Image: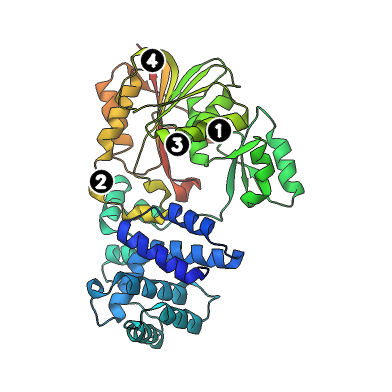
Amino acid sequence: MSNPRELALKSLVKWSESNSFSNLEANTVLTRNSLSEADASLYSMLFKGVIEKSIYLDYVIKQYSKIPNSKIDIETKNILRMSIYQLLFCDRIPEYSAVNEGVNLAKKRSKGFVNGLLRSFLRGGKSVKLPKNKDESFCTENSIPKDLFDLFEESFGKETAREILSYKGEEKYLCLRVNTLKTTEEKVLEYLKAKGYVAEKSSLAKDMLLCSCPISQIKELIDKGEIFIQDESSRIASQVVDARAGQSIIDLCACPGGKSFSMAIDMENKGTLYSYDIHENKLSLIEKGASRLGIDIIKVAKGDARNTIEDHVEKFDKVLCDVPCSGLGIIFKKPDIKYKSIEDINKLPQIQLDILNNASKYVRVGGYLIYSTCTLNKKENQDNIEKFLLENKDFVAEDFQVGNINSQGGVYTFLPHKDNTDGFFVAKMRRVR
């Protein structure tokens, strides 16, 4: 199958029925189908765009349909979502093409319904009457579940919640971590600029370059182990650890390995670094990555971060807990995250606190405990740190600096619209006795 709209429809139906991860689905489809660059781009735009705007698109369908949304079969509903998305957000796609392609995708029994609704939408000037209530209007227009808006409002207040949830992200660029065991920032910058790409040093993350080039153009550098792809947020979390040569460090939730690699490089490949993760099938990613980067101090093993390893108690200089979280800081990158169940999100803080309490056992007196997430949920962030410090008087908050940003009482929440990064949280604590 090579029709990008048909592929997008099948992916959307699968996502609608199973809540599958959109990035994994997209990678699978693009790998298995030989699409031209233009068709691959159209597939990705339709699949991810419809997911991002699904609440708004369903609102439009409801406004123009004589059939209740609950009575429209899932395939027809996604055809309408795709078609309306093209009519509203794709200036380069002619209206007749968006309508005709949608009708062609529909089953025989649904063709008339799809054609009629889309023609009615066009006759109506593509107008959409949003709810009068300001919060409802904002959530509809930005496709934000109301309970998610309420969660952000509780954490940040209404104005900041709106700014975070309407953030669309800057122009896409790759974040490249330079492996200073093999090369320098300057040499990689020269290489990228010689190829005609715009690249610059990150203002926040050490040894990190931001570049607009496609991955295919830097494969040589990746294969040689001179760079690896790592989000600024991941690098900053490992940077706050302040790993140094000769130290002993644990990364308790290590996969896919970026933070472990960064810390090992900061350690000049001298010392001891344990990388644990509960997902045994992913540990080979760390081993292969470390080998490519020329790192041999990482010791990889399966481990549940909530279970104590007695041999490690009070033995380590630094312990990093980049805990499993709701991911609400990166919904502008992965829009399907915003449809997560609030009930499931509310189960996470206790798991995270259990990991943090267990991790604290490994820190020697004078050592440091670092906690990080890629979410903006106060319950998973500040509340967990406050509970931990209240119950663990052996630890105190430790301030840190990243670029020109100073922590506030040993914690800092990076906001996408403010710091031009992923939304994420970092806390640093020192064991004093």
- Mark 1 is on which residue type? Lys
Cα distance, mark 2 to mark 3? Answer: 24 Å
Q: Which is closer to the viewer, label 1 or label 4? A: 1
Q: Is residue 429 left or right of residue 182?
A: left
Marker disc for residue 288: 1
- Marks 1 and 4: CB-CB under 8 Å? no
Numbered circle sitting on residue 312: 4
The CA distance from mark 1 to mark 2 is 33 Å
Q: Where does label 3 land, which residue?
A: 282
User: Dot 2 corresponds to which residue?
Assistant: 344
Q: Residue at x 46, y 74 (%)?
A: 86
Q: Amino acid at mark 4?
A: His
| Residue 305 seen in the figure | yes
The disc, 4 or 3, on the residue closer to the chain's N-terminal end is 3
Q: Secondary structure at mark 4?
A: helix
In what quadrant of the picture does the C terminus appear?
top left
Where disc 3 sits, the SS reads helix
Report whether residue 432 is seen.
Answer: no
Point 22% across, 47% down: residue: 343
